[in-house]
Image (cartoon, rainbow, N blue to C red):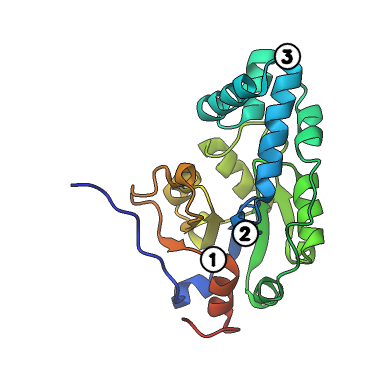
Amino acid sequence: MEKSLPPAFREAPEDLIAADVWIFDLDNTLYPASSRLFDQVDWNMTDYVSQLLDLPRDEARKLQKQYFREYGTTMRGLMTVHGVDPQAFLDYVHNIDLAPIATDPVLVEALEKLPGRKVIFTNGSTAHAEKITRHIGIDHHFEGCFDIIDADFVPKPAPDTYDAVCRRFDIDPASAIMVEDMAKNLVPAAALGMTTVWLDTGVGWSRENAEDGHVHHRIEDLAPWLATITGTRRAS
């Protein structure tokens, strides 16, 4: 029998509001994928590979995606195969225009009212996370950020990286909720005992493993869903 995606979930059960810690992914999660902001990062990666290896853009693009599939991030592939300096790579690819995203009053209010500690867990950099969250006015809601540097450049979904996040912020996984746009990155979270929330952006590659039972809740828009949880908006 063909597997199907879990149904979209809009109303919030009481067990979610009682969570001690909320763990949020950054890109395409704390800001809408429809802004196409991450497209800038993605194309910067292509440019970096093209310049580094003196490849035409189409060949660089193929290699970039190959490294993403094989190593979890393009950067990890470049580090492993070509000895690339990760900081130089991060600085280059995160040099983007933030104009496509703006403060979302619904998200700001929902995070303000959402009980529990809040942290960011990203395969990007803390500098990138801080720049974006400051721009959209939500940086003060987060206790901290666990980034790819903290992970010793071993990206999600490596299970050891999730263990490291829990140690860093003294998180009991059974009392934590993780929100993420890439379904496969929720596999280790569920294995640890976290409640998982998959933000389905409609992008094909983000749906990998979405049908495998580790997604507890599927949502389609973060801000109004959080607003429903906090009582700042009626469930639709």
Mark with earlier residue (1, 3): 3
**What residue sits right under mark 1 in the picture?**
221
Q: Nearer the viewer, mark 3 or mark 2?
A: 3
**From what the image shows, is residue 222 above or below residue 153?**
below
Whether residue 165 sits left or right of residue 83 in the image: it is left
Whole-angstrom CA distance, mark 2 to mark 1, is 8 Å
Name the side, left or right, on which 143 lies relative to 181.
Answer: right
The residue carrying pointer 3 sits among few (fewer than 14), some (14 to 19) or many (20 or more) residues within 10 Å by Cα, namely few
- Label 3: element kind: loop
Q: Is residue 137 above or below residue 159?
A: below
The mark that comes first in sequence, 3 or 2, is: 2
Image coords of residue 47 (percent x, y)? 73, 28
Q: Are marks 1 and 3 in contact (CB under 8 Å)?
A: no
Of callouts 2 and 1, the N-terminal one: 2
- 75 or 126: nearer the viewer: 75
Q: CA distance from mark 3 to mark 2?
A: 33 Å
Residue contact at pointers 2 and 1, CB within 8 angstroms: yes
What is the three-letter code of the residue carrying label 3? Answer: Asp
- For label 2, the residue is 32
Name the residue located 47 percent from the left edge and 41 percent from the top edge: 205
SS at circle 1 = loop
Q: Residue at x 62, y 31 (%)?
A: 154
For label 3, the residue is 54
Q: Quadrant of residue 111?
A: bottom right
Q: Secondary structure at mark 2?
A: loop
Question: Is residue 60 or residue 225 the one in the foreground?
Answer: 60
The local crowd at label 2, few if under 14, some if 14 to 19, many if 20 or more residues have their Cα within 10 Å, is: some
Residue 194 image point, x, y percent: 48, 56
Report the amino acid beneath label 1.
Answer: Asp
